[in-house]
Amino acid sequence: MSVKKLKALVSKFNEAEKSDFELFINSPFFNKNKKLSILYQYLYPYLDASNNEKIPLGVITKKCNIRTGTSSLSVHTSKLLHLAEAYLVQLELQKETATYQKLLLQALTDKNNTELHRRYEDAEKRFHPKRKSSTYFLEDYMLKNAYLENLSATKSLKVFQEFSEETIRSLQVHFFCRMFGHYFSGLSMQSVYNMSFQVDDLDLILKLSRNISVSREPLIKLYYQATLVLKEDKEATFYEFLRLLNQYQDEISSKDLNELYTIAYNFCIRRFSENNYVNILFDIINKMIEQNALYSGPYMPINRIRNIVVTACILKKFAWAKSFIKTYLTAIRPELRDSVRAFNMSVILFNEQQFEAALAMLNQSEMKSLQYETSRKLLLLKTYYELNEEEALYNLAESFKGFLKKNKAFSTQAKAGMMGFIKILLPLFRTKNGFSRMSPASIQQKMERLEYIGDKQWLLEKLSNLTTR
């Protein structure tokens, strides 16, 4: 699917844009993954609208030294698609700023200093909103630089120097925002997917951003602290980041807030088993809603709506969760809405202990998303456990184990956690229904021997119920 979208996008480029896009992909500033550059070279002949040949994906995968399997190729083509979209954004930005600067310079030509200053201030108010973003500082630099070219002949050297420093500062802020954004992506991939990411010059960037005037800018303070959260993964760093977010959230654009709050959101997700972080996560979710920073782009990621509903259910906020689904259903891609709604409603019904109704909803929610289908299978196992559906439970457990063994898209830890869940769930079920003489204490010991266990809190709750019977 990503290859088709990439072809639909690239085939519309003119020759100059195709050449620029190739330079864009080969630039280490925009793309650190050399495999993507190689993959693009092999795909390029097939991305022309007039070329209807079937793309030999298997051959290309081997030539690019990409791990065999559709999921790995899909990840790489999706990244290429994101690069193409990022290139279009850069292209549009260049057009806008070039036009903007040209118009501004025309307006400033042959005007005296008073008129220049008045026009500059008017433009600043018109183009610069209260909430700042990294793009704001690029526009600010363009605006000030245009004004500076006319100011040089009419102002004293001191005034010119001061204004020059302000102009350079705006460019520096934009540069550091872009650099930190690059590290956000890499460090997030490293923590979530256990992928390697080069951070050789990160310490230098952090040091430079603290030793120059830009360190006073709220956006840089937040980006700096967010980078530390990803780099260090420490509680003290995280709590300082939350403090800064609370202090400056009303001064930052919703797009940047989305990126910043997502870092705090993911930090809590990684510690989901700790109750304190569930409460913090719910607070972060509500702030993202208040600041219109819950998602960027046209649609909300379906995994985010799932995590939010699960968080609300852990805190027994069922009415809130139902209202959230109703409010944000239109923020989901149209073709996924019915399945996403059915699955998330089944999560709520399950937590309300309406197991029959939850099972009926689960049967309506099957979809191709790997993470959603995995969550669906896990919830089905738990529902079968609660309803004492022996045959259905065992059949699903066996097919799920086979599914996990064959699928290479899961990290080692995630796969081990889900396998661990099944290893504990089955003896729990047998002991619960008198099919086994295994004691709750023996099951507890088995749990302690396993390094990774998914949904451990729920399993401990079921074990506790057996112990108190």
Image (cartoon, rainbow, N blue to C red):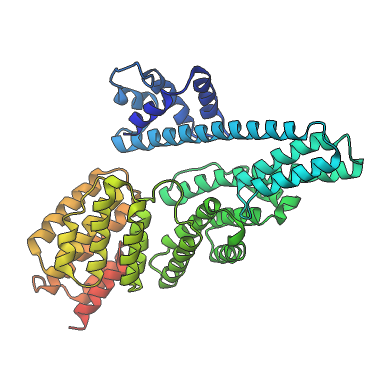
x, y percent for residue 204: 67, 46
Residue 419 appears in the rendering: no
x, y percent for residue 137: 66, 45
Q: Is 114 left or right of 386, judged from the image as shown?
A: right
Q: Is residue 326 above or below residue 10?
A: below
Q: Is residue 147 above or below residue 21?
A: below
In depth, the one of 382 and 156 nearer the eye is 156
Residue 410 appears in the rendering: yes
- Identify the residue shown where x is 71% and y is 54%: 215
- Identify the residue shown where x is 44% and y is 52%: 295
- Count of numbered tags: 0
Query: Picture quarter containing residue 392?
Result: bottom left
- Identify the residue shown where x is 61% and y is 54%: 131
x, y percent for residue 270: 42, 60
Query: Picture quarter containing residue 425?
Result: bottom left
Residue at the farthest bottom position: 468
In depth, the one of 163 and 430 nearer the eye is 163
x, y percent for residue 262: 48, 55
Quadrant holding the C terminus: bottom left
Q: Is residue 268 above or below residue 76?
A: below
Quadrant holding the N terminus: top left
Q: Is residue 466 above or below residue 92?
A: below
